[in-house]
Image (cartoon, coloured by chain):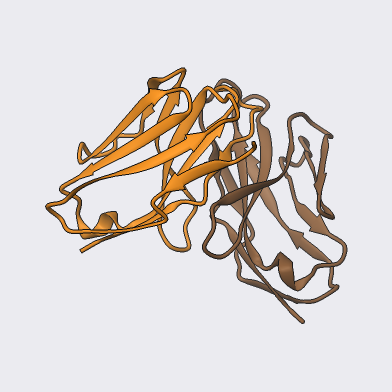
Chain colours: A orange, B brown
Amino acid sequence: DTEVTQTPKHLVMGMTNKKSLKCEQHMGHRAMYWYKQKAKKPPELMFVYSYEKLSINESVPSRFSPECPNSSLLNLHLHALQPEDSALYLCASSQRLAEYNEQFFGPGTRLTVL
Amino acid sequence: GDSVTQMEGPVTLSEEAFLTINCTYTATGYPSLFWYVQYPGEGLQLLLKATKADDKGSNKGFEATYRKETTSFHLEKGSVQVSDSAVYFCALSAWGAQKLVFGQGTRLTINP
């Protein structure tokens, strides 16, 4: 199994809602990532987990809250988002945090904040 | 800091044309280099990679060679197909770093 899966595929939420994005991989990878991608731009790194511990937080606003319950799962909890947070949210994983390890990306969750 | 510069798109070619997408980088040490492809409505897929100087990555007819002397990793394909239409991202992972640095992406359209 060489896939990273993400649910839901699409999400529409109001600014007062609380929702969660889910990501799963069964490749035995120990590093997992959240990215945000706006239209016609490259992905921007948000968070990195290594061995289920938060390794990097790229100064992301607290309305985004990551969670890594186990080595296969990564969640992104959303609360009180703004319309400018509308974007494609990508999850990725790699074997470990090492510069030569390629990252495998999921298909993304298309988020719209009304 | 580390950075990646890609040729600006969009690039439009006819089927069976030769493709080159230029990518140059700035990094300390010896980074690993990657090309990712993003088809419409999808996530990124790794196309190829090279982890040391003079390495050639190849996949699906695409090739790129890690040139340390020119700090480049240009993507080439001898004969493109309509199905190659996508956005291509060059990226690096610097020595000791924990993240990818992406170029701005190049949108490629192949016409039949």
Residue A20: x percent and y percent?
29, 43
Relative to B54, A83 lies left or right: left
Residue B99: x percent and y percent?
51, 32
Q: Residue at x 67, y 41 (%)?
A: B34
Residue A1 at least partly seen: yes
Residue A59: x percent and y percent?
29, 34
Q: Which residue is drawn at 53% across and 34% down?
A: A25
Relative to A38, A64 lies left or right: left
List the single residue furthest toward the left.
A16
How many numbered marks are there?
A: 0
Residue B1 at least partly seen: no
Q: Nearer the viewer, residue B53 or A28?
A: A28
Q: Residue at x 51, y 25 (%)?
A: A31
Q: Residue at x 66, y 27 (%)?
A: A100
The quarter holding residue A113 reads: bottom left
Residue B83: x percent and y percent?
72, 68
**B32 vs B25: above or below:** above
The quarter holding residue A1 reads: top right
**A49 vs B77: above or below:** above
Dividing the image into 4 quarters, which one contains the C terminus of chain B?
bottom right
Relative to B8, B12 lies left or right: right
Q: Which of B23 and A89 is in front in this view?
A: A89
